[in-house]
Amino acid sequence: MGNDVQDTVDVRLGARLAELRAEHGWSLAELAEHSGVSRSTLSRAERAEISPTASLLNRLCGVYGRTMSQLLSEVEAEPAGLVRAAEQTVWTDGASGFVRRSVSPPHPGLRGELVEGRLAVGADIAYDRPPVPGLEQHIWVLDGSLEVTARDVGHRLATGDCLRLRVSGPTRFRCPGPRDVRYALVVVAP
């Protein structure tokens, strides 16, 4: 995805984050207190001066009670029943090298969603909490290997392996190599 497209997504995402904060009637300082993210980082993300990381979005999703796919779908022009591969939303966390493709058409009334994740060798993403407590995840490795830690229990997944878990605390996704990992993530809201 080109930088212009990513910049446009970041601008729409920043505007949506500012809208959500306004809907809650919070100042930047209040949101910082709720999320544990600095006021300056929140301000820069809302103004699209920075591209938010997966970790930052996860914290904000937790505060606003949304999954990341729900939040990203809110910045799309209009939900559709069918989304062609070329039209699926792809979001990149430049800091970690995490690439996230929203495969299933986003819909606010549905509880399930399908995401494709890609991590480069050595990429390591830690989430301090789930965006929605009790979220169910099915992680199916399509190619490569992935280390997932949840509830202080580590799981090493190889091609074809699938892990099901209910997320209630910190999680970590790491690509140990020797090649990049590609996986499908099925997310089911409680």
Image: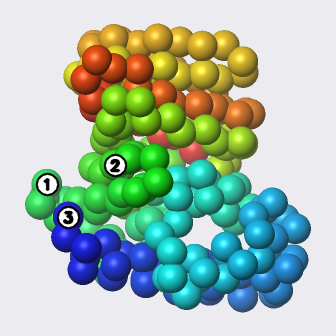
Residue name at image x 45 percent, y 47 percent? 96
Q: Earlier in the sequence, mark 1 or mark 3?
A: 3
Left/right of residue 20 with respect to residue 1 in the rendered view: right
> Badge 2 is on which residue?
99
What type is the residue that disc 1 sits on?
Ala
Task: Using the image, determine if residue 127 lies above or below residue 15.
Answer: above
Left/right of residue 87 with respect to residue 43 in the rendered view: left
Residue name at image x 72 percent, y 88 percent? 22
Q: Nearer the viewer, mark 2 or mark 1?
A: 2
**Quadrant in which the N terminus is drawn:** bottom left
Residue name at image x 62 percent, y 86 percent? 19
Residue 124 location (% of width, % of height): 50, 35
**Quadrant in which the C terminus is drawn:** top right
Neighbor class of circle 1 (other Cα within 10 Å; few <14, some 14-19, many 20+) is few
Neighbor class of circle 3 (other Cα within 10 Å; few <14, some 14-19, many 20+) is few
Residue 63 visible in this rendered orientation of the protein = yes
Residue 133 location (% of width, % of height): 72, 42
Left/right of residue 77 with respect to residue 22 in the rendered view: left
Task: Using the image, determine if residue 121 lies above or below residue 34.
Answer: above
Neighbor class of circle 2 (other Cα within 10 Å; few <14, some 14-19, many 20+) is some
Residue 24 visible in this rendered orientation of the protein = no
Residue 18 location (% of width, % of height): 63, 85
| Disc 2 to disc 1, C-alpha distance | 15 Å
Residue 164 location (% of width, % of height): 51, 20
> Badge 1 is on which residue?
85
Q: Earlier in the sequence, mark 3 or mark 2?
A: 3
Q: Secondary structure at mark 1?
A: helix
Q: Name the one closer to the observer, 79 or 47.
A: 47
| Disc 1 to disc 3, C-alpha distance | 13 Å
